[in-house]
Image: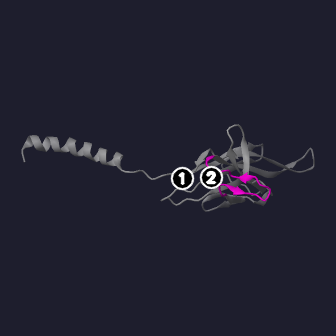
């Protein structure tokens, strides 16, 4: 092989490698999730939440599911804290004008926050949702293709010296919008 063809072989192989890397199909991400987002903070606590939603995508491990977790941390929003907490999860569908309830949002799930070897822990909820299911009253839940999201409400029980009792403090987190067909 001549010196000239050897010099051309290097750049050509680089271009070929780049072409092959960009031409290969990329793995699909079939879910939308926001993790460890601060939804409320006070002088002695920080409330964080995770909210996610997934939909069935053929050929990819997926399901029509929504999930959420509530976390309590010290006021620095870094150090996990043991507290009573509650979480509420609702799947919503965009109608074109408003976000409409689809599934979930019923009873609150109560638990205790803390930490383990992987980080903060807290009460969690997940729901499966089916598209186009008709209720006994004739309305359609999760009415077929469209934009969906998970709404998570996370709260912790905090002592209020003025009320001389525990009160719930927290906020709401949305997963982000997910197109479902």
Query: Badge 1: how crowded within 10 Å, few (<14), some, or many (20+)?
Result: some
Q: Which residue is depicted at the point 66% across and 58% down?
A: 130
The disc, 1 or 2, on the residue closer to the chain's N-terminal end is 1
Q: Is residue 68 visible?
A: yes
Q: Which residue is depicted at the point 70% across and 37% down?
A: 97
Q: Position of residue 20 (x, y in %)?
A: 30, 48
Colour style of the rendered protein structure: one colour
Q: Which residue is depicted at the point 74% across and 43% down?
A: 41
Residue 5 part of the magenta-drawn span:
no
Assess whether mark 2 and mark 1 are in contact (beta carbons under 8 angstroms). Answer: no
Residue 133 part of the magenta-drawn span:
yes
Q: Main secondary structure of the magenta part?
A: loop
Q: Is residue 147 left or right of residue 13?
A: right
Region rendered in magenta: 129-146
**Residue designated by label 2:** 53
Q: Position of residue 62 (x, y in %)?
A: 55, 59
Residue projecting furthest to the left = 2
**Residue designated by label 1:** 30
Regarding mark 1 in the picture, which secondary structure is present there? loop
| Front residue (pair 97, 9) | 97
Q: Is residue 75 visible?
A: no
Q: Position of residue 156 (x, y in %)?
A: 79, 52
């Amino acid at each position: 092989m001549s010196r000239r063809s050897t010099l051309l072989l290097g750049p050509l192989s680089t271009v070929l490698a780049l072409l092959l890397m960009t031409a290969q199909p990329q793995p699909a991400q079939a879910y939308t999730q926001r993790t460890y987002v601060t939804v409320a903070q006070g002088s002695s606590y920080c409330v964080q939440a995770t909210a996610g939603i997934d939909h069935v995508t053929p050929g990819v491990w997926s399901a029509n599911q929504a999930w959420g977790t509530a976390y309590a941390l010290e006021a620095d929003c870094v150090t996990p804290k043991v507290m009573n907490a509650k979480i509420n999860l609702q799947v919503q569908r965009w109608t074109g004008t408003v976000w409409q309830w689809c599934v979930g949002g019923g009873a609150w799930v109560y638990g205790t926050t803390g930490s383990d070897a992987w980080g903060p822990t807290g009460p969690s909820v997940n729901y499966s949702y089916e598209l186009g299911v008709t209720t006994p009253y004739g309305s359609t839940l999760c009415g077929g293709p469209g934009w969906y999201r998970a709404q998570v409400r996370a709260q912790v029980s905090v002592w209020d010296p003025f009320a001389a009792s525990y009160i719930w403090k927290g906020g709401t987190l949305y997963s982000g919008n997910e197109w479902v067909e």
